[in-house]
Amino acid sequence: MEHVKTLENKLIPMGEVSIIGCGRLGVRVAMDLIEVHRGGPKKIYLYDGEKIDNNDIIHRKFGGKIGEYKVKFVERFYREKIVGINENINLNNLDLIKGDVAIICIAGGDTLPIRHEIINYCKERGIKTIGTNGVFGVDEKIKVSDAKYANGPVKYMNIKEEGHIVVGSERFIRDGEPITPYTLDEISKKMVIECLRILNGIYRDNYKVSEK
């Protein structure tokens, strides 16, 4: 019994994660990471400059108020773990990104240039990156791939090196299918799993205890 207690005491949150974008997907990722028990990140930095509006159903379901900054709502939800920064990441504030893992959940318009810059910035600093690869589709299998070898929208990024993980349906907006909550739930789930694998790999030795 003593050994089990020692193991439990070792399984504490470690490391830091940046979530870039707190829309329909980003807020799911944040909430799923918050809920991880006996491990997961110690601190989550959440970046988004937008406020909750009438269409942000998922935020409102969690208790967010219309007119409230999305990131500040999540920070209010769990102040001990979340740091909400109400700014959109752009070319002039990449230095705000920190931690062991950056999860890129930005959407709307042409996001490819800023995604490229985020990935390059993080790579130079040893921050692992996870991003999306299509969020459209009614009943699509969600795939996890290295961006270098993936099909789908990420091919337009023309990523030449390994290391950027992408999660998604591989469907395009031109396919004319909606974004469903079920697809976003599954993408969030797999993003969180990949994030936890990275954190566990970095901090594995901290969790180890002697069998004696």
Image: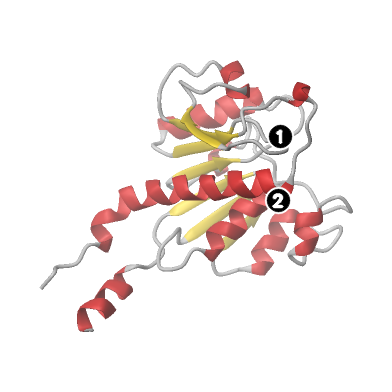
Determine the residue positioned at 32% across, 74% down.
8
Q: Is residue 22 visible?
A: no
User: Dot 2, how many residues are within 10 Å of its Cα: few (below 14), some (14-19), or many (20+)?
Assistant: some
Q: Is residue 134 visible?
A: yes
Residue 195 image offset from top left, x and y in percent: 46, 47
Q: Is residue 125 left or right of residue 64?
A: left
What is the secondary structure assignment of the residue under circle 2?
loop
Q: Is residue 122 above or below residue 193?
A: above
> In the rendered view of the protein, which quadrant contains the C terminus?
bottom left
Name of the residue lying farthest toward the right: 54
Q: Examine the image and state in which quarter residue 163 appears.
A: top left
In screen coordinates, is 53 left or right of 175? right
Q: Residues within 10 Å of mark 1 (few under 14, many from 20)?
A: many
User: In the displayed structure, would residue 204 be above or below residue 171?
Assistant: below
The numbered mark at residue 62 is: none
- What is the quadrant of residue 60 in the picture? bottom right
Q: How many marks?
A: 2
Q: Which residue is mark 2?
A: 86
Residue to which mark 1 is pinned: 137
| Up/down of 175 relative to 48, above or below | above
Q: Looking at numbered disc 1 in the image, what kind of residue is underneath it?
A: Gly
* Quadrant that contains the N terminus: bottom left
Depth check: 143 or 36 in front?
A: 143
* Residue positioned most to the bottom: 1
Q: Which residue is found at the position 78% from the left and 31% from the top?
A: 177
Residue 187: x percent and y percent?
59, 43
- The residue type indicated by label 2 comes to Asn
Q: Are marks 1 and 2 in contact (CB under 8 Å)?
A: no
